[in-house]
Image: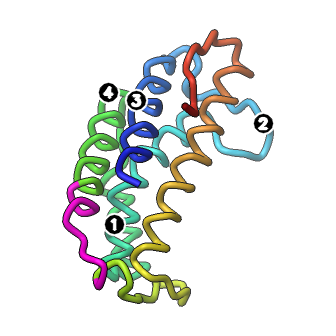
């Protein structure tokens, strides 16, 4: 899982480099997130999903998102990388018992820690693909391999 997180993080960081002020507020698909909103969401996911694992309430999460809203692509990249680093550090020290431990999210879904970590990986991969597709739709020549 750690190798996959590292690869996903590397490719998301590379995709962020294709985002510039000329296109960042474009919305390639009507009624969906803008390119910038996808970047903000990706930047927030690693730490946010860790806080959910820690049992943060809906109100606490809303505060996290409000306080940790990047204002530039460089800021988004830093927030994302800090969250990924914290997530990987956690993964490296989890025991089998900790991975099996169950918790309930603020929206009342139950997961084991291992299941939640898998959710984080798929969440990141989903929005990475979304960012990749948006960049292609905005005529950026993206040369990144998403899977190896």
Q: How far apart in space, not on screen, are marks 1 and 4 (Cα)?
A: 22 Å
Residue 17: quarter of image = top left
- Give the vertical position of 9 relative to 143 (above or below): below
- Looking at the image, which residue is at 80% across and 39% down? 30
| Contact flag, marks 2 and 4 (Cβ < 8 Å) | no
Q: How far apart in space, not on screen, are marks 3 and 4 (Cα)?
A: 10 Å
Quadrant the C terminus occupies: top right
Residue located beneath label 3 in the image:
13
- For label 1, count other residues whose C-alpha is less than 10 Å away and answer few (under 14), some (14-19) or many (20+): some
- Looking at the image, which residue is at 49% across and 48% down? 41
- For label 4, count other residues whose C-alpha is less than 10 Å away and answer few (under 14), some (14-19) or many (20+): few
Residue located beneath label 1 in the image:
50
Indicate the position of residue 74 as horizontal and vertical percent values. Answer: 32, 27
Which label's residue is closer to the chain start, 2 or 4?
2
Frontmost of labels 1 and 2 is 1
Which structural element holds mark 2? Answer: loop
Segment colored magenta: 89-97
Which label's residue is closer to the chain start, 1 or 3?
3
Q: How far apart in space, not on screen, are marks 2 and 4 (Cα)?
A: 24 Å
- Looking at the image, which residue is at 55% across and 14% down? 22
Which label's residue is closer to the chain start, 3 or 4?
3
Q: How far apart in space, not on screen, are marks 1 and 2 (Cα)?
A: 30 Å
Say whether residue 114 is left or right of residue 33: left
Q: Report the disc number at residue 29.
A: 2
- Give the vertical position of 22 relative to 105 (above or below): above
């Amino acid at each position: 899982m750690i190798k996959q997180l590292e690869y996903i993080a590397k490719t998301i960081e590379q995709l962020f480099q294709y985002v510039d002020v000329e296109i960042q507020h474009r919305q390639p698909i009507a009624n969906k997130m803008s390119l910038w909103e996808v970047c903000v969401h990706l930047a927030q996911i690693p730490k946010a999903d860790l806080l959910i694992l820690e049992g943060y309430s809906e109100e606490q999460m809303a505060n996290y998102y409000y306080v940790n809203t990047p204002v530039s692509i460089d800021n988004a990249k830093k927030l994302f990388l800090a969250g990924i680093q914290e997530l990987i550090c956690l993964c490296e020290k989890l025991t089998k018992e900790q991975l099996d431990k169950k918790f309930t999210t603020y929206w009342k879904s139950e997961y084991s820690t291992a299941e939640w970590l898998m959710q984080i990986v798929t969440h990141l991969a989903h929005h990475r693909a979304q960012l990749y597709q948006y960049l292609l739709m905005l005529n950026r020549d993206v040369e990144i391999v998403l899977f190896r």
